[in-house]
Amino acid sequence: MKRILIGALLLFLSVGLFSCDEHFEAIDYKEVDSIGQFENYGQIRDYLDRFYEDKGYSRELTGNVDYLMTSTVAMTTMATQNSPESAALDGAEKSHSESNDQVAGVKEADRILTDGDTIYVMTNQALLIIDPEAMTIVDSFQYTTDGYLSGMYKYGDYVVLLGSEYHYEWTEVPTTQANTDLDVDDDTESRTSAPYYYGYMRYRYGTRVIVLDISNKQDIVKSKELYFEGSYLTDSRMIDNQVYLVMNNYAGNFGYGSDEETFIPAYYDSTHMDEIETMPARDIYYMPNNFQSWSFLLLASFAVDDDEAADVKAYLGSTYDIYMSLDNLYAIVNRYKVNDVSGFYEYETFVIRFAVEDGQLVYRATGTVPGSPLNQFSMDEYDGTFRIATTDTKYRDTGFTIANALYIFDATSEDTMEQIGSLTGLGKPGERIFAARFSGPQALIVTFVQTDPLYKIDLTDPEHPEVVGELYEEGVSDYLHPLTEDLSLGVGRQAETVDGFTRFTGVKVALYDISADDPVNLETYLVEGEYSYSPVQYDHKAFVSYEREGDDFAYVAIPVYEW
C-alpha cells in the first residue's frame, strides 16, 4: 500500500512540476512590436510552435526529436586563477606593426600577433610562442579537440583562442520491431521479440573559447574556458579586456521535443559550471517581427583577466555580419520578400543595435534598409549616427535591377532606428558596390561593372549627404585603406573590356589623393596575370601597414599570388 501511495505521490509531483512550467501567457509573434523576455520553456515552445505552423511546418511537441545536442556532457572542472591587471612589458617597448582593425580601440581576431618582443602564431591546431631573435618556439599550446582554431586575441599576459569544433557520432537505437534478417537459433526467441538495433550519424558542433595565462612564456597555463554547444561563431571583438562573441544557434531549425535540452541553447563556463547547462528561459528574448527566424542569436561577453561569469543572452533571430564601435554593436539580418505589386523578389536588411554597457551587450533598437551591405566596411558609426551602404538587387522572371544607396540613421534612438538621411542612385546602370570605407565626415564608395567609379561623399550634414567628386578608371578596388586624412590605398583588380566583355588582368594597388573633391590616382602598382589575386581583396587582416618612429613614410605589406 505504501509503495502505491509513494508512486502516486511521485506521479503527482512530476505532473505538477511539468504543469507549473507550462503555465504562461501565449505570445503571438505577429503582434510583437518590442523586445521581451520569455517566462519559461513552455512559453518558448508555444512561441516556436505558432511560428512553425504559420510557415507550413509540422512540429510535434511530444517525444524527443534527437537531431541536436543534449546538455548532459560533463566538463572537467577547472580552477580559475585570479590575476593582476596586465603590466607593461619588461624593458623599453619596441616599435612594431599593429593589427589591421576597422575601428580604433575595437580589436578583431587575428592569426598572427606581436608585442614587439614575441611573435604569437595560431595554426589550425596550436598556438606557438616564438622568440624572433633566436627564431625558436619558446612554448606551444595544442588544441586537442575535433575542429580548428579560427582566431585569437592578446591582452596583457593573456591570449584568448577562439575555436570551432565538430564531429560525427554514431547513435544506436534499440527496438523490438520485427527483424526478418536476424537468424534466430533459440526457440525461446522469435524474430519479433529479438532486440534489433538501428542507428544514425549525429553531427555535433560548437564554439570553444580558451583563455591562456602566458605571464611565464615557458609555461602556458589555461585560466578559463567556455563552450557554446550547437553554436557557430559569426564574429567577435575585444574592447580593452572585454571579449564579445556573436554566434548563431540553429536549435529551432531542426525540430524539438518535450525536453528543453533539445531546442534551447546550452553552454559551459568554467568559472562557475561543472558541466554544460541549458540557458535559463529568462535569458532568452523574442524580437520585433521575429526576423522570420526560428534560430537563436547568441551574444556573450566576458573579461579576459578575471574569474567572473560570462554574460550570455539569446535572441530569437540570427545574423551574418556585424559592425562594432566603442559604444554599440550592430548585427545585420538579410531577408527577402515578394512585392505583390511589382512581382520582384526584394531584399531588405534588418539592423539590430546593441549598446555596450558595463561590458555587456544590451538591446536598444532595430532599423530596416533596402538591399544588403557588402561587408563590415559598408557600415560605420560617427557622431551619433549609423551609416550603411547597400546594393539592392530585385529579381523577377523577366530579369533583375540593381540600385546602390547610402542610408544614415540616428544611432541614439530607442526601439526603432530613425532614418535621418539617404543618398540613392550611386553608380551607373548594372553596377554594384565592390568596396566602401567611411572616415569621419566622408565616405569612399566603389561601384563596378566595366570601369571603377570611385565616389567621394560628403557626410558633414547627415540629413543631406552628397557626392562631391568621382574618379573613373579601369579595374576595381575590393578594399580601401585610409593611410592619412588625404591619402587612401585601394587594393583590387585591373580589368579590360574587349567587345563588351570585361575580364580581369591582374592585381592593382592604387594610391589616391582624396584631399580635393575629385579623387586623384597618384600611382598604380600592377601584378599581371589573369588569375592573380591578393587575399586582401576578401580578408583585410592580410593587409599590414607600419610607420616606424622617425620616418615620414609608411611601409605596406600586401600578399599577392601570381597566376
Image (spheres, rainbow, N blue to C red):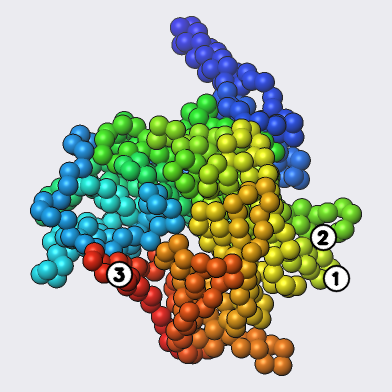
Location of residue 422 with respect to 542 vertically, above or below: above
Q: Which of 164 and 317 is in front in this view?
A: 317
Residue 195 lies, in percent from the top left, at 50, 47
Give the number of the disc on residue 43: none
The amino acid beneath tag 3 is Asp
**Residue on which the image places disc 3:** 552
Q: Looking at the image, which residue is at 74% across and 66% down?
A: 402
Front residue of 340 and 210: 340
Residue identified by numbered label 1: 398
Looking at the picture, how far across and down is residue 125, in whole percent?
A: 30, 61
Residue at the spot 74% in from the left edge and 31% down from the top edge: 31
Q: Where is residue 303 in the image (x, y as percent from the top left)?
A: 32, 38
Tell me the quarter of the image containing the C terminus: bottom left
Give the mark, 3 or 2, whose residue is nearer the N terminus. 2
Q: How far apart are marks 1 and 3 (CA)?
A: 56 Å
N-terminal of the pair, mark 1 or mark 2, is 2
Mark 2 sits on what residue? 344
Label 3 and label 2: CA atoms lie apart by: 54 Å
Look at the numbered disc 1 and give the secondary structure of its residue.
loop
Depth check: 383 or 125 in front? 383
Residue 306's image quarter?
top left
Residue 232 showing in the rendered view: no
Going by the numbered disc 1, the residue's amino acid type is Thr
Give the side of residue 515 with respect to residue 559, left or right: right
**Disc 2 secondary structure class:** loop
What residue is at 64 percent from the left and 39 percent from the top? Answer: 417
Q: Which of marks 1 and 3 is nearer the N terminus?
A: 1
**Residue 500 coordinates in the image, percent (x, y):** 72, 88
Which amino acid type is shown beneath numbered disc 2?
A: Phe
> Residue 347 vs residue 523: left or right?
right
